[in-house]
Image: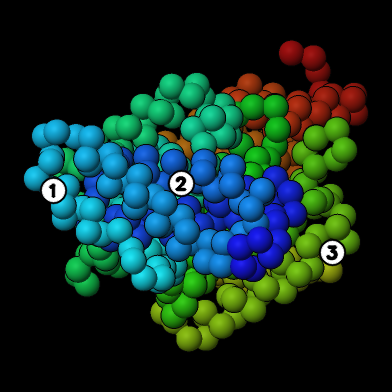
Amino acid sequence: MTRGGGRPDGTPELDELLRALAPQARGALLRRGGSFDTCEDAVQDALVAAAAQWPAEGLPANPAGWLVTVASRRWTDAWRQDVARRRREEAVAALEPDEPVVVRAADDALTLLLLCCHPALPPDAQVALTLRAVGGLSTAEIADAFLVPQTTVGQRISRAKQRIRASGARFELPVAEERAERIAAVRDVLYLLFNEGHTASSGAALQRVDLSSEAIRLTRQLHEALPADGETAGLLALMLLTDARRPARTRPDGSLVPLAEQDRGRWDQAGITEGVGLISAALATAPIGAFQLQAAIAAVHDEAASVEDTDWPQILGLYELLSAIDRSPMVALNRVVAVAEVRGPAAGLTELASLRATLALAEHHRAIAVHAHLLERAGDTEAACVGYETAAHRTLNLPERRYLEQRAERLRARGDVGLP
């Protein structure tokens, strides 16, 4: 759309456009050698200018180029105002683009993701910086999403920028020997972000759709930059297949609906189709990895017409493969559920007893809830009731807590469980 030829349709659409363009502008400036924080400030000024001018004047012919040009000028002005760096003024000023700006969106998005997930940063800082620099979320939005004070998020981002500067990291792709490990770190951060959105670790809402949606958007960017990477395709497929069930996971009052009780007619069939297509292609063309196997398990669930039609033997077989390459506690716990579905609750209880004796997961509310569920299926309702109540006290997510409390209440209502 040329200048004056049209306007953004509304504030949400303009916000979405600016959020998508911001990483490209940051990448263009960082590629020229600026520090992370000075480039960040310059891009923020350009975004403010765009939000003020574009609704009145219409979109420029090259919105990304417009942002880069304005941000470059802000960046140059900032250098000029810094007396200690006057000797760089001429070189920096010369970087102002005189020709149409070419923005390497896919390359820059990948490089920026890798920079935000630098190994010098702790996971919480990686998540915050990724949301800020790549996702375009404000400090207030990130704080609201994670239910922490804005000052905490601001400090995390500030420290992250300082660590990146101290590490000497540059805005460039890592050398080939480091690239696979760094990309794996990006996937882990995006997976962590999606999981927090899918089931919040605390708070009154079961899900935080803004976080899960942002994780999917960023993973799409990563997949576009690395279309042949099987694990990135697997991660995107896993997110889509899991998120497809979101419309049926809660009732109108926000309470949790377990998978077995969900109305599958409310699942997002377009998301399922896309996810199945992605994982099918990845498994056929790339080395098998953990995200691909998790996506395959999600696909088996999503393709079952009813809970009774679920192919649990296939799911257990996939978990056996997954357990061989991913020994994380949650994978082990989910495998126990599959064992119980295939071989019965007694077998599941035996596996779980061994698992809880050796892993820190023993006191996690989900492990306790699985134990209670298997006890209920095995007929030990009193112990199951105690387990549900214990698990309810351990979770900080209110919908999960209410669901577990209701499970205990239903058992007590049967009349064969004594009051504590």
Assess whether mark 1 and mark 3 are in contact (beta carbons under 8 angstroms): no
| Coordinates of residue 341 in the picture (x, y in percent) | 69, 58
Residue position marked by numbered label 3 in the rendering: 306
Badge 2: residue crowd in 10 Å (few <14, some 14–19, many ≥20): many
Residue 417 versus residue 31: which sits nearer the camera? 31
Which label belongs to residue 46? Answer: 2
Left or right, 298 with reference to 193: right
| Coordinates of residue 370 in the picture (x, y in percent) | 64, 41
Which label belongs to residue 88? Answer: 1
Which label belongs to residue 63? Answer: none
Callout 2 amino acid: Ala
In the rendered structure, which disc, 2 or 3, sits on the residue that comes first in sequence?
2
Label 3, label 1: how many angstroms apart (C-alpha)? 66 Å
Q: Nearer the viewer, mark 3 or mark 1?
A: 1
Can residue 351 be seen here? no
Please determine whether, in this image, residue 383 is positioned above or below residue 91.
above
Question: Which quadrant holds the C terminus?
Answer: top right
Residue 203 versus residue 89: which sits nearer the camera? 89
